[in-house]
Amino acid sequence: MIIAAIKPYKLDEVREALTAVGVRGMMVTEIKGFGTQSGHTEIYRGAEYAVNFVPKMRLELVVSDALADQVVDTITKTARTGKIGDGKIFVLDVASALRVRTGETGDEAL
């Protein structure tokens, strides 16, 4: 399982790149959070205010072991802007997978 937090405006570009390398599905959630930058300040109508949580998109993908490194590399290259807040990627082991509709398990369920 690959979990990635990326900038919202990079979502379509990342999705297209992942589709090109063979990813057949993913879950996407709008999230807010902060990392090293701990938020920032903005000015709106002359008033300065703190933005403590930065909007991000959370991608969750479960792929075969053979595809995992390529998916991480694709997300990294596509989501990178070189500026603070580009995001994070986490890779976790999945004990099992089951497709509810067909009962398929393992890689066939992916």
Image (cartoon, grey):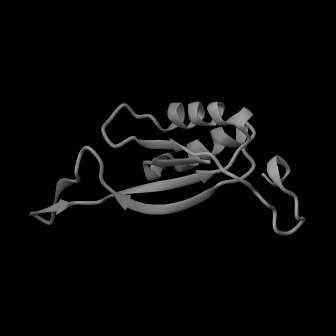
Residue 46: quadrant of the picture: bottom left
User: Is 39 situated above or below 29?
Assistant: above
Horizontally, residue 93 falls left or right of residue 46, namely right
Horizontally, residue 1 falls left or right of residue 20, namely left
Return the residue nearer the eye: 93 or 76: 93
Q: In the image, what residue occupies the spot 66% across and 36% down? A: 68
Return the residue nearer the eye: 109 or 57: 109
Return the residue nearer the eye: 8 or 65: 65
Q: Position of residue 92 (x, y in %)?
A: 57, 46
Horizontally, residue 85 falls left or right of residue 71, namely left
Residue 22: quadrant of the picture: top right
Q: Position of residue 91 (x, y in %)?
A: 55, 42
Q: In the image, what residue occupies the spot 66% across and 41% down? A: 18
User: Is 1 situated above or below 69?
Assistant: below
Q: Position of residue 86 (x, y in %)?
A: 39, 41
Q: In the image, what residue occupies the spot 81% across and 62% down? A: 99
Farthest residue in the front direction?
95
User: Is 69 situated above or below 12?
Assistant: above
Horizontally, residue 72 falls left or right of residue 62, namely left
Farthest residue in the bottom direction?
101
